[in-house]
Amino acid sequence: MINVVTVIGARPQFIKSAVVSRAMSKRPEIREVIVHTGQHYDENMSDVFFEELEIPVPDYHLAIGSGLHGYQTGRMLEAIEKVLLEIKPEWVLVYGDTNSTLAGALAAAKLHIPVAHVEAGLRSFNRLMPEELNRVVADNLSQVLFAPTETAVQNLKKEGIRDDQVYLVGDVMYDAALFYGAKADKESGVLKRLELNPRGYVLATVHRAENTDDEARLTAICRGLMMTARELPVVLPLHPRTRNILARAGVLRELEERIRIIEPVGYLDMVMLEKNSRVIATDSGGVQKEAFFYRVPCVTLRDETEWVELVVHGWNRIVPPRSAEQVNKGVLTAAEGSSEVPLLYGDGNAADKILNVLGN
Ligand code: UD1
Ligand code: UDP
């Protein structure tokens, strides 16, 4: 029996791990032990995904919660170490680039337990982003690196990571989009609930620290989206980080008068909102790709992206949020990419490819 401890804790990790957990449950030779760090804990940032995506209830819930980076990561490290000493797994599986990823990889590496990293090799080359630090460290601590794209493979090569440690498996988020996308069509009533017309609105998400913690950038995004809302309704499922900051700055009410601000939604509703939007404006990594999966034009409100192939193929345009006019113009002129796009994120079987490696 191969014991795999999966460490997850933030919204995108629940979505990524859902398809791998589903595939693992069909492999009798693998036993998965799920550890939820508690990095995200609101019902609509955590539980909703376990229920909708039928992710097994975590075997361990560490309930770490929010805090400064060192505090949060340190508490996770201590708690994950205890679990790993008890389970003594063959693998620790981590996803993406959050503090939960870093803590899981570091706790395992210090105990000489092999680490497998899903979504390895992504780089923004911007070391001011906490995610970039987490990725670089997690990749360097991993024995096995599952890269979603050829660009990611090349990034790892340039950093001197051995070829035989790197597997190009495609993106588990594409697996998720295929599997749960069909479910969303059947089960989500979000368009009706919000009285939205297909292709009749802009969908926006904002949560990245470089935007929320920089007053000038956050103001440019908010004012820019308010300008856009004069032309097209803007729907903004608001991340709690951003909500807290906007509320503290006293601008939430004004924003709410112009923009459809809603609570974060479950994955099925999110997919439905994405599929039917005219344009997506986002600083999320996952949402950029989902825009492409559903062939919706996307504007990325950042200075760079890790998912560079989407920019090359025209499905994504980088619009650094330097002024409200720039944001508004970027959103209103977002263009569709070429229809001749190759398979950029694999064939929808990334989860199985991952398990073929871990189960060996
Ligand atoms: C984290 C990840 C980021 C990822 C994002 C996905 C790190 C460093 N960042 O950012 O890479 O893109 O998750 O959404 O790991 N909060 C709540 N309720 C919750 C969760 C958070 O109110 O359930 C609020 C708290 O005020 C908290 C803040 O959001 O301090 C930030 O949460 P945190 O998990 O530290 O970072 P994210 O911005 O969510
Ligand atoms: N998402 C969701 N509900 C929301 C906003 C996002 O289900 O209200 C999903 C989205 O479809 C994508 C993932 O969460 O699959 C992206 O997570 P997030 O933007 O928080 O993090 P990132 O991808 O930037 O790390």
Image (cartoon, grey):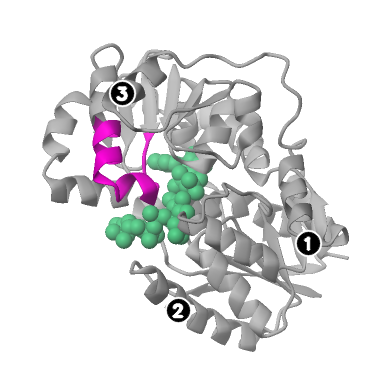
In the figure, residue 345 lies in which quadrant?
top right
- Quick one: SS at disc 3? strand
Q: Is residue 186 magenta?
A: no
For badge 1, the amino acid type reads Ile
For mark 3, what is the residue? 234
For mark 1, what is the residue? 161
For residue 323, side relative to residue 180 (left or right) = left
For residue 285, side relative to residue 241 (left or right) = right
Sequence-wise, the earlier of marks 2 and 3 is 2
Residue 148 in sight in this render? no
Are the residues flagged by discs 3 and 1 in contact, CB closer than 8 Å?
A: no
For badge 3, the amino acid type reads Val
Rendered position, 95 above or below 272:
below
Sequence-wise, the earlier of marks 3 and 1 is 1
Query: In the rendered view of the protein, which quadrant contains the C terminus?
Result: bottom right
- Quick one: SS at disc 2? helix
- Quick one: SS at disc 1? loop
Residue 328 in sight in this render? yes
For mark 2, what is the residue? 74
Rendered position, 94 above or below 329:
below
Residue found 34% across the figure and 66% down from its top: 66
Majority secondary structure of magenta residues: helix
For badge 2, the amino acid type reads Gly
Spatial CA span between label 3 and label 1: 43 Å
Sequence-wise, the earlier of marks 1 and 2 is 2
